Image (cartoon, helix red, strand yellow):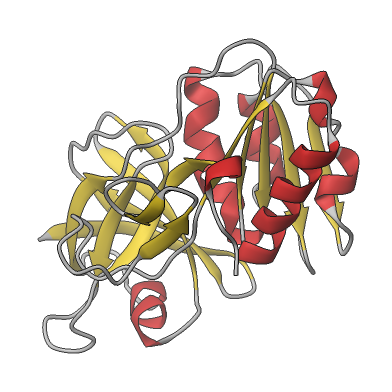
Amino acid sequence: MATVVANQEVAQGVFKLTVQGRFTGKMGQFYMLRAGDRYPLLSRPISIFDITENQIDFLVLVAGEGTALLAGLKPGDTLTLDGPFGNGFPQSIGKTAFVGGGIGIAPFYYALRQVPEADVYLGYSREAYMVEKFRSASRGNVTVDVGGVILDKVDFNAYDTVIACGPHPMLHAVQRKQGQSNGRAKVYVSLENRMACGIGACLVCSVKCKDGRKKACADGPVFLAEEVVFE
């Protein structure tokens, strides 16, 4: 069990959850979080937003009962926290763009600690949040779009590496945009699949790829965009 230090609502239905302790993780990895010991039984996969010496931060979007319980935690409460899981982001090579849609912005703040010169594109449907934190962490450009299509602002041909995280329709659009570019950039997508175990045992997070089915939690959640078959 881990102890909550703070839980701040940063936008409607979005909470920055801070947990005390010493934690590890690579950029793009996630932890499995669960509040309560009876229901719901399954933990929720939440990307690492930040890690410092004595705490770890997550951005939690309320999307159901499990995340609502996480959002309701108060300082001093405890939760079950396991991880880190997943393959994480690749080590970027050359000029890099991080593209986040909605709660998909979450893993890129921690990623900026390792690739601070990356350009960051943050897309929101209704309300922007955490933008100033991204600007303070970045030595590159931070582009924000509210209510539009953040991908319209990204020129894939200007980058060597593009990493995107967000809802499946956005990531499918990333794949299509890559196909329309001249192929210079290596393009990766981080999938927001439902998960149950985090270690590849249960197959709940199965992903259809061109060379067969893979597990988002163990083989991913980060895949080359060209590998994934979006349905």
Give the left or right position of residue 189, taking residue 138 as reference. Answer: left
Residue farthest top in this picture: 94
Residue 200 falls left or right of residue 187: left
The structure residue drawn at horizontal position 85% and vertical position 39%, both measured from the top left corner, is 180
Q: Position of residue 54 (x, y in %)?
A: 24, 35
Side of 72 where 181 appears, left or right: right
**Image height of 95 relative to 185, above or below:** above
Q: How many marks?
A: 0
Task: Report x, y in % for residue 40.
Answer: 23, 86
Quadrant where the image shows the C terminus: bottom right
Image vertical order of residue 222 relative to residue 169, above or below: above
Q: Residue at x 26, y 64 (%)?
A: 33
Q: Quadrant of residue 72?
A: bottom left
Residue 29 locus on image (x, y percent): 36, 42
Check the picture and name the quadrant holding the N terminus: bottom left
Q: Residue at x 47, y 34 (%)?
A: 110
| Residue at x-position 23% and y-position 58% | 198
Estimate the x, y position of residue 11 in percent, counting from the top left. Answer: 64, 66
